[in-house]
Image (cartoon, rainbow, N blue to C red):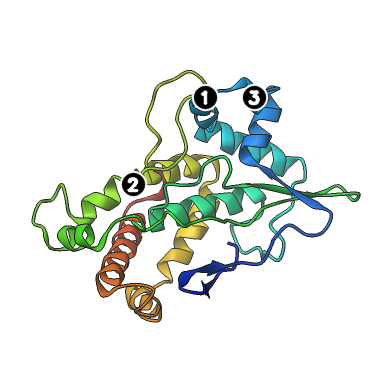
Amino acid sequence: MQFYELARCGPLHGVISPDFVPAGGMLLSGNDLLMKSRGLRSEDLEPKQLARLHGLRGVLSHLQRLSDDGLCMPRDFVPFEGIETPLDVFVGYLLFDARIANPDRHGENWGIVTITPAEDEFLAPAFDHGAAMGRSLLDGERAERLRTKDRGRDVDAFCAKARSAFYPMELGERVKAKGTFEVCAVAAEYAPLAMKAWVNKLRAIEPHQIDATIARVPDEVMSHIAKTFTAKVLKINRARLLSVPTGELK
């Protein structure tokens, strides 16, 4: 995952991150790769068609082919048991998305970096998670979801309804994006050992560490309600990911 730090520019709070594309390199987005593989151009597609080009199985199959053809791991990534290919690493991105309720892994939010003249290519690190963990919710809604007894409205329901930016069909189909946990189930079919390895990494993160990490965020950046809501989202999704076999994540 790309490295981030909290930052401030005058009265505005945000994050800052180093550029992961080195000199002489270029980021090719997922959309670029998928269109190229089909002989398409962006100007040939309407926005909705371009979004639906982002079919989950198509993405995973394409990354599998790139991995087999010599695509490198993200720079500075240290492989560990069960994680041996760029596809295996990408499976970790999808598990992370499910954990943080990230709806934004669309075709512009992943890709590969190509470097000339050496023609090296490597998977880009995971980036742009700004829409995760209910960031767009106001504190009033967060508070209401935390205290309600309506099981269709509480934080568990919010987590269960989280959707990805991956679609199950190809061009022309009118379908909803897959849920983040459904994405993990499909990814586990492609790389079961990798999914198990990433789940084990998640298992090592204890709930008290989640609380301790969020508590470090300055109060002027994140309200008490936002911290409480975010911690609960992360704990619910962690428990859910750990409670079922990887082949049954839905």
Q: Nearer the viewer, mark 1 or mark 2?
A: 1
Q: Hey, what amino acid is under mark 2?
A: Ala
On the image, numbered disc 1 is attached to which residue?
49
Q: Which mark is residue 162?
A: 2
Question: Which badge, 3 or 2, is on the more N-terminal residue?
Answer: 3
Q: Residue furthest front?
A: 10
Question: Which badge, 1 or 2, is on the more N-terminal residue?
Answer: 1
Number of numbered discs visible in the structure rendering: 3
Q: Is residue 78 above or below residue 97?
A: below
Q: Hey, what amino acid is under mark 3?
A: Glu
Q: Residue at x 64, y 28 (%)?
A: 42
Is disc 1 in contact with disc 3, using a CB cutoff of under 8 Å? Answer: no
On the image, numbered disc 3 is attached to which residue?
43
Q: Which mark is residue 3?
A: none
* Residue 105 % position (x, y): 50, 46
Q: Nearer the viewer, residue 69 or 117?
A: 117
Q: Residue at x 77, y 45 (%)?
A: 70
Structural distance between the alpha carbons of marks 1 and 2: 22 Å
Q: Nearer the viewer, residue 100 or 43?
A: 43
* Residue 67 % position (x, y): 70, 44
Q: Residue furthest left?
A: 149
Asked if residue 11 lies left or right of residue 139, the reply is right
